[in-house]
Image: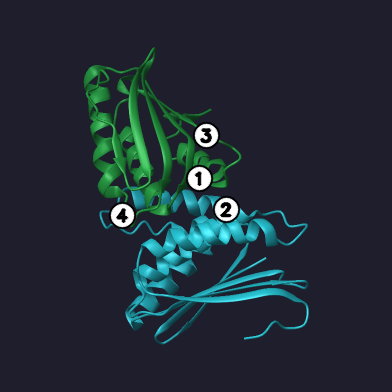
Chain colours: A cyan, B green
Amino acid sequence: MNLEEGDDCFMELTFSRRWKHVSVVRTFLQSFLDVNFPDGKQTTPERVAMAVSELMENAVKYASSEGIRLSLTVSGHDPVLTVTIENPAEPEAVKTVEALYNRVMTGEPMATYLQMMMEAATRVEDHSRLGLIRIRCESGCRLRLETEPELVRFTLEL
Amino acid sequence: MNKLGIAPITHDRVSIDVADAATGVFVSVVGDIDMQDPSKLLDPFFLKLHQAALKEGTPAIEVDFRRLAFLNSSGIKALAKWAMLLAVVPTEKRYKLRFLHNKGLTWQATSLPTLTFLVPGAITLA
């Protein structure tokens, strides 16, 4: 893909489902955004990198096969920053992610975060289910979910 | 070794140390916690610390997060579980839990204050 009119940079990366990619992407993205971050925004490269890290964790957990794709666009027009992370997923996993997203986007963010922390603390399963609500509360970005029968795609926009 | 007999941990990119302090014990957490399932590391550690502190009547546990650059959401869950352990301890038997945080790190400025609301009055931030 080439840069479109008004875009400063575009990148696309494809990963396998290895956990070690999560921290590599977070570190790289934060360093990249430290020198390419759009001016005049309330959020920071650290917050965006945290959000991408949580979405990468979700993608690794829920991916049904290899091929987690991350794309990033920094643009001179709105949205000035777009990060998309998508992964193939089993239909059941797609439903799980949809339900979690709908829960996270409901209510006042910090109240929902507190409630979900309480639930996480008393749940036995290893998934925290706190990543998306954390993004809503901490990232300073808009979060959007799109799904297809066997695909999950999250988009962060600034 | 500290008076609670808790051994330090170094795992992956995080190290956790426990030292005696005038008011109890001081726990320092340094590095990044971003492993896939930090509960395997943190849950037993926090439980041991909690039980030892109650047994010894430790007045306070101070946890220094200021050099913990990153904590993933599974790590936040582990902290929430620790906080909820205090919820079932009668107030007069609880130790004081104090988190030292760096407001310049977003996760510490947002997630740590939220954790203090889980058990009102049990955790303070500094």
- 2 and 1 marks in contact (CB < 8 Å): yes
Checking the image for residue A52, the label placed there is: none
The structure residue drawn at horizontal position 62% and vertical position 86%, both measured from the top left corner, is: A1
Q: Residues within 10 Å of mark 3 (few under 14, many from 20)?
A: many
Chain containing the residue with disc 4: B
Q: Residue tagged by mark 2?
A: A138
**Quadrant assignment for the N terminus of chain B:** top left
Q: Residue tagged by mark 1?
A: B111
Q: Answer yes or no: are tags 4 and 1 on the same subunit.
A: yes
Q: Answer yes or no: are tags 2 and 3 on the same subunit.
A: no
Q: Residues within 10 Å of mark 1 (few under 14, many from 20)?
A: many
- 4 and 1 marks in contact (CB < 8 Å): no
Q: Amino acid at mark 4?
A: Asp
Q: What whole-number distance in Å separates the C-alpha atoms at marks 2 and 1?
A: 8 Å
Q: Amino acid at mark 3?
A: His
From the viewer's perspective, tell me whether residue A133 is left or right of residue B52: right
Q: What whole-number distance in Å separates the C-alpha atoms at marks 4 and 2?
A: 21 Å
Between circles 4 and 2, the one closer to the viewer is 4
Q: Residue tagged by mark 3?
A: B101
The structure residue drawn at horizontal position 25% and vertical position 48%, both measured from the top left corner, is: B40
Q: Residue tagged by mark 4?
A: B37
| Element at label 2 | helix
